[in-house]
Image: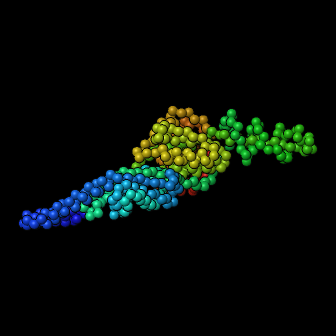
């Protein structure tokens, strides 16, 4: 483009000298034409610039991680002039990463038409992917002038995490919601307010569970199995505060969310309804959600991911734990390695039968450095990307 401008400047100078040296009308016409050409080119592309618009189009607002997804750049040209080859620079990044990836596209834009260019992206980690145009450059037919349009056109897409199979033990406790009417459909318990099943007597069964009226009709002892309440006060506290800004921020965040999903799925499989507490940057407050079904968990995960912004601001867990009294059967503190005062506070002040601190660490060596020196709090390190093997013996 620079050489084209230089060529026209040289040609105009030559035509001007030719007009000065010669009196012919042809010299004047040639000079006017050489001056008019860049002027016409400038105003034609300037007007075209005003009549071009662009936007991103996404098929879905959520995608699975490690799966390619299509993104369309739609350019609408309402002018009568075509653009032979527009230059587009696009960049994208995850909110939890400092790494910005960019690439270039070259697009012809037809007159009075809409041009759609499709490209594919994918993400190794969950989170929000920001996609934006750095610029769209359009040129006149002779490529003398360049105008930039479409700067800062953006779109966002949520990359959803995956759950992992984990093993563990779910303990049943006397701490239940006495006003609840939610009982297990698969396991008997000790709640006499509702009968789970009727069966034949087995030696060792308690006499007070014999159904005497029905037994007299059957000429055999029939025993009542009582129901098992599943409305047990259990909480997962998800701490999304970033304790360091580095290349590990995104993998740590990804592991935190997937650990939450894995724990919650495991509890649902074992008929343990529970609450999840997390800080929402969107609402600037701590949110508590009750999870009693897989669709409620899926909705929660999307809310957590969508609640974040570029500044990654999150209040520390102490802002909630210090001001709220909890009485629970099971409490899980899910975090990356936190500030030193939080874990001792949980150990000494949270009233729960079972307390676990599930801490995401960067490596096996960092996991070995964590000391389980608390009397009531179990420390469970989770190495980035190794969720199943790290939480194989958790007790809830």
Q: Is residue 126 visible?
A: no
| Residue at figure coordinates x 65%, y 40% from the top left | 232
Label tally = 0
Q: Quadrant of residue 351?
A: top right
Q: Position of residue 301 (x, y in %)?
A: 54, 47
| Residue at figure coordinates x 60%, y 35% from the top left | 327
Q: Is residue 181 visible?
A: yes
Residue 227 placement, left or right of 208: left
Residue 57 placement, left or right of 218: left
Camera-nearest residue between 344 and 329: 329
Residue 129 placement, left or right of 374: left
Q: Position of residue 340 (x, y in %)?
A: 46, 42
Camera-nearest residue between 140 and 306: 140
| Residue at figure coordinates x 51%, y 60% from the top left | 67
Q: Position of residue 343 (x, y in %)?
A: 51, 41
Camera-nearest residue between 194 and 18: 18
| Residue at figure coordinates x 45%, y 51% from the top left | 156
Tell me the quarter of the image containing the N terminus: bottom left
Q: Position of residue 196 (x, y in %)?
A: 77, 43
Q: How is this picture coloured?
A: rainbow
Camera-nearest residue between 156 and 153: 153
Q: Quadrant of residue 24?
A: bottom left
């Amino acid at each position: 483009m620079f050489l084209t401008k230089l060529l026209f400047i040289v040609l105009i100078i030559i035509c001007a000298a030719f007009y000065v040296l010669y009196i012919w009308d042809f010299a004047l016409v040639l000079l006017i034409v050489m001056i008019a050409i860049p002027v016409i080119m400038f105003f034609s592309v300037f007007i075209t610039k005003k009549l071009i618009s662009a936007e991103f189009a996404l098929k879905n607002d959520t995608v699975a991680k490690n799966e390619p997804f299509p993104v369309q750049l739609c350019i609408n040209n309402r002018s009568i002039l075509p653009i032979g080859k527009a230059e587009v620079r696009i960049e994208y990044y995850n909110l939890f990463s400092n790494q910005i990836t960019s690439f270039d596209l070259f697009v012809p834009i037809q007159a009075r038409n809409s041009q759609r260019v499709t490209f594919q992206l994918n993400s190794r980690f969950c989170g929000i992917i920001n996609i934006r145009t750095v610029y769209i450059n359009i040129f006149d037919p002779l490529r003398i002038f360049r105008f930039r349009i479409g700067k800062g056109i953006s779109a966002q897409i949520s990359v959803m995490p995956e759950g992992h199979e984990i093993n563990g033990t779910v303990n049943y406790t006397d701490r239940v919601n006495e006003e609840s009417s939610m009982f297990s459909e698969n396991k008997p318990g000790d709640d006499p307010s509702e009968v789970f099943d009727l069966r034949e007597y087995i030696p060792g069964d308690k006499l007070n569970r014999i159904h005497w009226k029905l037994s007299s009709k059957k000429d055999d002892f029939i025993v009542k199995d009582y129901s098992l309440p599943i409305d047990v006060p259990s909480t997962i506290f998800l701490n999304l505060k970033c304790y360091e800004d580095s290349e590990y921020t995104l993998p740590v965040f990804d592991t935190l969310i997937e650990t939450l999903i894995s724990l919650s799925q495991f509890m649902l499989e074992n008929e343990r309804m529970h609450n999840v507490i997390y800080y929402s940057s969107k609402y600037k407050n701590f949110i508590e959600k009750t999870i009693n079904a897989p669709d409620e968990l899926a909705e929660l995960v999307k809310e957590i991911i969508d609640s974040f912004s570029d500044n990654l601001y999150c209040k520390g867990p102490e802002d909630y734990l210090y001001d709220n009294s909890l009485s629970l059967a099971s409490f899980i503190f899910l975090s990356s390695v936190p500030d030193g005062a939080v874990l001792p506070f949980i150990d000494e002040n949270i009233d729960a039968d079972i307390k676990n601190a599930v801490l995401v660490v960067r490596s096996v060596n960092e996991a070995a450095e964590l000391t389980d020196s608390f009397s009531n709090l179990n420390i469970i390190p989770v190495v980035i990307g190794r969720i199943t093997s790290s939480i194989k013996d958790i007790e809830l």
